[in-house]
Amino acid sequence: MVAVKRVVGCRVADPDVEGLVDILIEAGRIREILPASGSPAGAGDLDACGMVAVPGLTNAHTHTPLSLMKGAAEDVSVDDWFNKRVWPMEMNLTPERVKIGARLACAEMLLGGVTGFADHYFFADQIAAAAQELGIRANIAPTFFSEAGGASRERAFDQTRAIVEMDSRLVTASVGPHAPYTVGDDDLRLASDLARSLGVRIHIHAAENMQQTESSLERLGCTPMTVLERTGILDAGVLIAHGGGIVASDREVLEPAAERVSVACCPKVYFKHDIDPITPVRLLHEWGISVGAGTDGAAGGNTLDVWEAMRWTALAQKRQEHDPLFLPVSDAFALGTRGGATAASHSNAGVLRAGAVADIVLVDVSGPHCQPIHDLTATLVYSVRASDVHSVIVDGELVVRARQLCNAELAEIVEEARATAPELVKIRPGEAVQHYAP
Amino acid sequence: MVAVKRVVGCRVADPDVEGLVDILIEAGRIREILPASGSPAGAGDLDACGMVAVPGLTNAHTHTPLSLMKGAAEDVSVDDWFNKRVWPMEMNLTPERVKIGARLACAEMLLGGVTGFADHYFFADQIAAAAQELGIRANIAPTFFSEAGGASRERAFDQTRAIVEMDSRLVTASVGPHAPYTVGDDDLRLASDLARSLGVRIHIHAAENMQQTESSLERLGCTPMTVLERTGILDAGVLIAHGGGIVASDREVLEPAAERVSVACCPKVYFKHDIDPITPVRLLHEWGISVGAGTDGAAGGNTLDVWEAMRWTALAQKRQEHDPLFLPVSDAFALGTRGGATAASHSNAGVLRAGAVADIVLVDVSGPHCQPIHDLTATLVYSVRASDVHSVIVDGELVVRARQLCNAELAEIVEEARATAPELVKIRPGEAVQHYAP
């Protein structure tokens, strides 16, 4: 591991900061941001000449091991995506395969400037190991369905406890009930009890689309948000994945819990699967709830590109609100940075300021697709590609240097994934981890 | 200029072709595609080991010089975008600045695997010179507004004639009336007469959104498509930019002209400026009209990334049709390749087959965001980034080799753009090339 003491001579995407700066780092945190001293980079320094430093992006909702299935479930309805493709394919999961998928995902994210992610999946210990190996910040929610029984729930709870006990600087946990339509109220109550007792949050799919909200109203007489409220989930604190079915009347339960609730918006999968409306960002922001941009799993979204997720969240929200002035570039940039970090319970991350964790990305904006620059934040939101990421620091350690992973061999990670992938997509009729019928 | 005789040992994105192939090139055309011989790359050969060969992408609608204004008109309404930002800024145009912007745009496109584009702009000779210098295929429509007077129209017509007379292999022309709301019927008739006499098509903005269609119905009693029909534009052949306001009743005039009509869909700007509905691709396809993916100018869309335009056209169309099965990956890929080439009047382009022009892009799909590959076409549509483009051949000549331009210095192009950009965005109250009031 290579600790960085100083990032030397970069621009920052802050309209209040003129000229070049040096960023001083100590014990994994930003100690100070100063006008550039002009002294050359020495030992422990990272030369950032010509680069723009931004806070690391955070992927607000993903399922890293599904990176092994990208492209294996295209051009299907949501029902078929779950019931004929992904949930049957997930029967092929083993701890080894989960780790292979998670390593691939962590590699893609780090090389693309993503310094943290909120994961929701099985075999959480394997994901934790991959994140620690590659040096990326992760909040992992071990998943369970009620139908799989109490033992399955307890196994997931134990995995959350085990990660909490690791007391890692990089890897933290949430409690991971799958969704209100696959997890009963009793189990949701147990989940919120556990979260409160451990001092962690819950990460759950809820009101993923309007159909789920309508179905909940029909079956239970209340919206999914009310289910989260009455089972203590909102009180414990929660990251809600998607929330396209959150409605105006949910204000009553959401607004009082605003500071404990985040929502992840993953635009690519909404368009692919015709989910309309999508996460109501304007409403959520009005209620004081933070929103982060996410990619969902690559079995749906194909990539873990948070630049794309941030950009298309902003564009899709302008369209949804019929207001081209909504989410100006500075607010759009926050969806991928501060908003994502809050979603992933990564406190004091997603910003460049003294005292924040030193999760820093150096972006090379010299390409013809970025130049000329009239508005640096607009460049970051609407022009920069994941491939413009040059170097990445997580928790003060250099994890990507000049577009190369520092802690693992990319070629080996990719080769392992290629060798395993064919086993993942074998489907056996009648076998699936769960049936989708929200 | 480096002519390529053979592309050696690549995969192709054609489900009917197994294993590796060699692509033989002669006189700017693909002579034959054969199973790979296994013989090593020699003189005149391009080693494509590990790469995927795809037909070059085509940008179906853009304004290349606006690349100098990227990021200078963010978070504004469509009206303000035109009237307070871009049309006033365009007063700063000079032939020299247009060339600087066009060179920057051509560089971005070639490095991103775009081998051709349909442009609509002023100072067309400068754009033509930039395209020839860098080695990219271009169809350029010299723009005019009726309000600027007959001399302005004749100047634009002369520019179209001049490009036709160049008889270039790479650069061709269209006739470029701006739009039915800025060009009167008499001028549209003169435009279609000229197009017919020169054997070229027209490139025009029309029915850009539903508001324009409604306004046309109110003012003229007919839709913009009927205006194109009665002024001879459909008969002469036309590339229609946007067409979000094309309605079912337009079938009567469009279907009979289907083989002469194309439409460009530029999704990024539609979302940014809240244009809803967007280009009705399903309807157009049903009528036999080809659709290409475009970026529009970078003053609106920020980048000239046709991978992004193709991907988000497909995703936005699934959503608009409420049908996740619409535009399966092979049809989506055609939006960026065959569809775009047809839009730009680039005949026999956008496909890899014997007899087609040798516009070939080698894509490196080894990155963690592309791997593993379960469906190569899905990888190309939903995972590949412009930065995965490794080498590019246009008309049989190598124009990008190992991510570097062959015919110009990128650093010089970018520096020239940076130096010029501040002059472009100076706005003088009351001055604009035109007023937007469709």
Image (spheres, coloured by chain):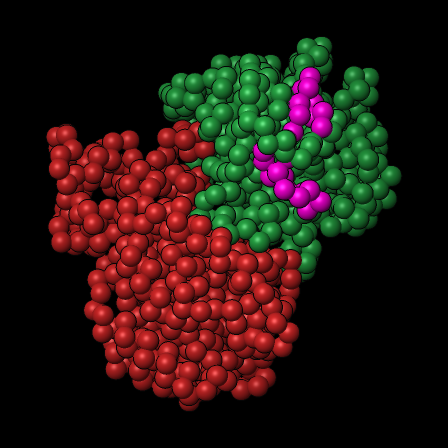
Chain colours: A red, B green
Q: Give the range drawn in magenta.
A: B9-32
Determine the image quadrant of residue A38: top left
Q: Tell me if residue B50 can be seen.
A: yes
In the rendered image, residue A430, in percent from the top left (x then y), is placed at: 63, 77
In the rendered image, residue A323, in percent from the top left (x then y), is placed at: 51, 52
Left or right of A126 on screen, residue B42: right
Residue occupying the point 40% across, 68% down:
A95
- Seen in the picture, residue B189 relative to A345 is either above or below; the reply is above
Say if the magenta span includes residue B10: yes
Determine the image quadrant of residue B262: top right
**Quadrant occupied by the C terminus of chain A:** bottom right
Q: Tell me if residue B209 can be seen.
A: no
Left or right of A147 on screen, residue A77: right
**B209 and B412: which is toward the camera:** B412
In the rendered image, residue B257, in percent from the top left (x then y), is placed at: 84, 36
Residue occupying the point 67% across, 14% down:
B168
- Seen in the picture, residue B412 relative to A333 is either above or below; the reply is above
**B2 and A33: which is toward the camera:** B2
- Seen in the picture, residue A138 relative to B340 is either above or below; the reply is below
In the rendered image, residue A183, in percent from the top left (x then y), is placed at: 47, 82
Residue occupying the point 23% across, 39% down:
A17
Count up the numbered dots: 0
- Seen in the picture, residue A414 relative to A232 is either above or below; the reply is above
Left or right of B66 on screen, residue A143: left
Residue occupying the point 25% across, 52% down:
A394
Say if the magenta span includes residue B33: no
